[in-house]
Image (cartoon, rainbow, N blue to C red):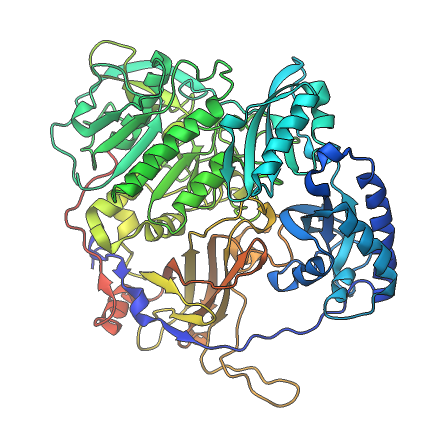
Amino acid sequence: MARENNFLLGYGERLTAPVTIKSGGGDKNPPYDFDTAKWQVATWLRTANNQFQTLPSEACPNDQVTAIITLHPRYVSKSEFPSDLLNSVGLRAVGGRTKKIKPREWGITKHPEEAITDELLVMGSRKAFSSWSENLNGWVLSNVSKHLTHFEELTAFSSEQKIKALPDTTNDIVLEVVLHDTENPVVIEQFMDFATKLGAQAVVQRAKQTKGLTFIPVYADKNIAKKLAMFSFIRVVRAMPTMRPLHPGPTRSNQYYQVNLPTEVALDPSLRVVIFDGGLPQNNPVTPWVNYIEPASLANPVPELSEHGLNVTSALLFGPLNLQSPASRPLCHIDHVRVLDDRTGTGGDFEYYDVLDRILEVLDDAKKANQPYDFMNISLGPDIPVDDDDVTRWTSDLDTRLAGGNTFATVAAGNAGQRDPLSGLNRVQPPSDAVNVLCIGACDNDRLPVWKRTAYSCVGPGRRPGVVKPDGVVFGGDNNNPFFVLTSRTGGINAAGVAGTSFAAPYALRTAVAVKAQLGNDFGAMALRALLLHRADRGIHSPVEVGWGRLETDYDRLITCDDDEALVIFQGQLPVKEHLRAPVPLPDGNLTGFVTIDATLVISPEVDPSFPNAYTRAGLEIAFRPNSDKFNTYDNGKVSAHAATKSFFNAKNMKISEFELREEGHKWEPCLKASQRFQASTLKDPCFDIYYHNRYEGMPQDDPKPIPYALVISIRAPKVSNLYDRVVRTYMNQLIPLQPKTRIQIRP
């Protein structure tokens, strides 16, 4: 059978079943004995309490102060969260972050020299901290006090630790101050008073709250930043971020040519698609397929920003234009929402807030009207790199709205890839660091077997979790091979060459829209994401540069299989407190040679922005069982209840060993992708057992609910030329080939 008729196989979830598997584990040998740990904590507490006493009372509402507890890297799981201990001494965890440390002791023989661990921000009254210190000597070992042996350090949260880099160019600046644990409005009032006494002005009416964090603009002399940061509820003090420069990419070609646009209507006008960008020029040629929206709060448009908006819209409507071919038929109608005005990029004090608020208002209104968007593209954002310690409001607010995976969102990674790598200024820019979006970088072509990341495209890693960023790369143009888009710079309907991740992102979105337009309701947003990442090819490139690899933009190759390959889509819900068994759909009969199994699993979790170290509330633990006849026999003679497991989703098979991960590894990552080759004779009824972990602010969740997932499994056996047909016949009453309603040509 020719490849063009070997369609993806859907409804893999019909093969799945819940199974109950007893968890293993047991007590660990702690790195420190109890008496040593108690002495260490007592010493740390004395030092911290001395520092707390130096804080002015007006900086400590209700006498509250913040400390940092650094956990040992072996004790960062949710089950080992020290909530019982904190409760017993009158403290509470209000946030967390990750840190690379070299522990004094490990408690085990084999260990790395350094490791990633968690820092907890804990609050309580000065009296609570001093009482803990006074009573600690009388503590004895118990299920509560044993947490002391898991601590690596305890310190006061100092002003210096809260301040991010401030500009050297001027003293009078606008700060963004982030406060935690601000449910009591009195805290905000006292912060405003505290800032005023220091000669600063907190613009409380522009404050924004996101899941336990409050973001407040503050006019101040940068020289008082350290004193301002003494306020005990402050998490971060930083210069107010500005928006990314929105010239059309780092390069612009002087090549222009006339374009013949199609006359057809959009292929699937029922799809809800939105672009948030700089607007559109008057008398633009995309009006037949675009609904142009300008929020009432906007100031005047800017021609350069409108040009960028037209370029981005062109990339989504037509992909890269080609002199040798007419423009492709648009796949959908687009709502283009202008969110930029003449204050953007000119140092407008609150543009960082205003632009995001316009985006959120449109998304929230669409949801309230029961018309949420199916697809979304953002090719703009703050001009700052991802921060490992803190989540921006852009990222957290978008992640919160996109949790659940009903909207497929692409975000440009940013064009700062040539900035200083040692300081991390070349890393992906918010909100592309969000775990519920597809962060798109740029490569120099999408057709040739030899390709590379463009120099301007921002690199990873992302924050942990969410470490694989960009998610992938797509052609975005460069000096030698520009990305041609519609332009308003010449008379008539013409194309100009540009370059930037701004255009790679909507081009990637166009591919996802094409799959949805052809396969319809058989494909949800998470399945689209899983498919695109599954088909991504990293080649010889580092995951730090290209994530999971170059995304496939050839529609036919995305939705079809070779004769020696079968690809199955699973969509459903992961149960709570049970494993979901997902079989690898091998055909009946013997196979010869080698079999390569590839699997990609995607979830779209809720998030906790106060706890960047525990940002995702959902995680995945997967056991691969290659042979149903192979069992483990334990030292006591008992045989395992389930077939023996073999490592599959590990750093080696996922090819992400370059990333530094915690001891838990990739458990809390929203996307897992791995590949492994087996001798066909070693496989019998292979399956994945998937367990969904849940947490809330790093602790066990009280009432978890099932969450949706998408899983793509492909099998390839080069010596079995009819593998696809055999799989179809074996599962003919369960798996269904997903035939497109119409075939379309994505690429010229």
Q: Residue at x 29, y 69 (%)?
A: 14
- Please name whichever residue, 556 or 199, is drawn nearer the observer in this view of the structure: 199
Image quarter of the C terminus: top left
Q: Residue reaching furthest bottom?
A: 637
Picture residue at 79% right of the left edge, 62% below the top: 31
Nearest to the observer: residue 267 or residue 213: 213
Q: Is residue 139 left or right of residue 671?
A: right
Measuring from the top left, give residue 573's x and y in whole percent. Answer: 37, 63
Q: Is residue 270 found left or right of 46 in the rendered image?
A: left
In this view, which residue lies farthest toward the top? 491
Image quadrant for the N terminus?
A: bottom left
Against 267, residue 574 (above or below) is below
In this view, 20 is above or below 238: below
Q: Residue at x 36, y 36 (%)?
A: 446
Q: Position of residue 63 (x, y in %)?
A: 73, 42
Total labels: the figure holds 0
Residue 36, horizontal then vertical, whole percent: 87, 61
Asked if residue 400 lies left or right of residue 279, the reply is right
